[in-house]
Image (tube, rainbow, N blue to C red):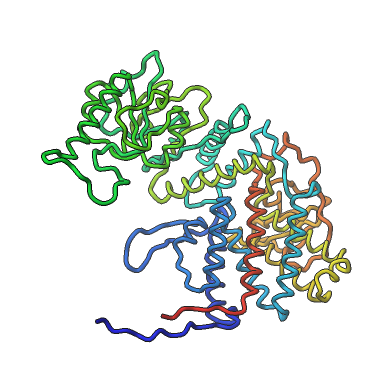
Amino acid sequence: MSRLEVQRSALRLSDPLSDGRTQQQLCELEQIFASCYGPCGQLKQIHNNRGGHIQTTSTALVLLRGVPVSDPLLKLLCASVLNHISRFSDCGLFTSILSCRLIQSALQLNFHSSTIVRIFKHLLGDCIRYLNSDSCACKLKIDFNSTQVLLSLARSIIVSKPACLLNSKEVQHVSCLLLKAFLHTVPCHIGGNTLLGKTIVYSIEGHRAEKSSLFPGMLLDLLDTCPKFVHTKLTSRSIKVMVFSASLSGDLPEGVNGGVEACTGVSPEAVLLESLLNLGSQLIADDVDLLVCQKVVHPALKQQLKKHKMIVVDRLGHALMEPLTQITGATAIASFQTAVPHKCYGQLKGLDMVSVASKRLLHLIPFEDSCVYTLVLCNRNETTLNELKIACQTAEHVLKLTLKDPFALLGGGCTEVHLSAYIRNKVTSEMNCELADLDCTATEYMVVARCFCSSLEYVARALDHEGRECLIDLSHGHKWIVPSNEFIGCKWSDLVTQCACGSIEKSNRMNWVVLDGNYDTFSPKLIENIQMENIPECIILDSFAAKTNALQVAVETASLVLDFKHVVKDVN
């Protein structure tokens, strides 16, 4: 009998944020995220001390999954950010940095945590109401008759991932492919059961990103199929397709539990193989051109079908089953049966072998109304290809979010600085109206609001990693970066040319101050004469839906962490 230990009582930690180790880990976590933020972010290598795969990245998703966090409060913070990323794909680093900064700033205040949390949530409500209002001066309305804003939005996301190692020409090429894929997956006709199409990402390592391309339908690997054999399927009639999600390997059904009774001298394997060959005979008789199976096809069935010039694709995987049924109209057979109903068959316009970079792939050519496209991504090595794939999937998701919320926020830190200026002005002008509802003093309200705005400005400054001076203009409340510290005695107007997002050019009527939170409050104005037709090509944009939700998640997560009074840990 093994030795038994007496179970120890759980350990209760009071006021966990007062622990120096927790505060140090929070500071280190913020520094990791802040150093990775933006197009000039520093890359991080993630690996463990036992060997294994090494990842090089600046992406929030990879960082949060790869960096081990032991503190329960920091685990909660990371889980909140990961949940946001799973829903919106973008603004993970923004959420992480802002949440960490709010917590650290609040810990330096000598106020009760409940008061800080109350004011934080009130200011968050002001931000969300302003962002959703028609008077918001840091967002653009997306007109789907023009592709300029959508292209800028996709390009801004790809540029923000420095590990992709793309030059400007490659960024533009991949952004255009992404936008084309998105527009093709939006149905032309809207009905009761209208669904968005799907973009399948196929990656090829060892080639420049300029080799990336877009194809209607699907591309599949066919290593054992001769190109001449496939070309025989380019007939004048449509291609008949049969799709199985059930295994055709000849094994016993997966749902069978326990033993199987069989008569003496009867081999179950032989019976199943005979059934498979009978299925093959029916497919041959019905002139099926292509058989696709999610799982495995028995070698004998493969050989039988290939003798009759039928193309067999197995081990397709679950992820590609839905787009395959979309483009073919076939019904995937979920259980093995020898008699296949004719209504389950699907159709394709044609089949062909295409050469992409160093690969030859089977192209499933759909009919004209297909909403499924394959984006072939190329990049120089495994690291850059993985980062590009994540960036493109993020950009595709963000573009789809614009169908529900057709807006974009100004990027480069301008939205954060503008929000900070708006909140500072609102707090000063409407303080007396807010104090009664918040149950706090004027000093508490002003100090916590300053902490909130400073955290927003900190995130905006985190985009610059060269120690340059950041300014704010006193007209529109945008962020400006001084390109060099050499001209200390010069006027700001001699050093800056345009704001960080690229939407405003400097003018003689503008005044700037250092972005350090000590400027006089003012009401930020709308940008004059900014219309869809004259939006600068170099403008940097952020996803409206993703950043709005990220702001909410960051503030609410920080408030939740600040509210914790006790943590119970199991020490057994």
Q: Is residue 546 above or below residue 190?
A: below
The answer to whether 566 appears left or right of 206 in the picture is right
Question: At x 12% / y 41%, what residue is drawn?
Answer: 264
Extreme residue toward the top, this view: 236
Query: In the displayed structure, does residue 200 sit left or right of residue 310?
Result: right
Quadrant placement of the C terminus: bottom left
Q: Toward the viewer: 2 or 439? A: 2
Question: x and y percent of residue 222 in the render?
Answer: 30, 32
Residue 313 percent across, percent down from the top left: 32, 33
| Image quarter of residue 45 | bottom left
In the image, residue 438 above or below residue 43: below
Residue at x 17%, y 36% (from the top left corner): 270
The residue lying at 64 percent from left, 42 percent from top is 402
Decide if residue 387 is on the left or right side of residue 530: left
Query: 432 above or below 295?
Result: below
Q: Nearer the viewer, residue 403 or 207?
A: 403
Quadrant for the N terminus in the image: bottom left
Residue 320 in percent (x, y) is at 42, 38
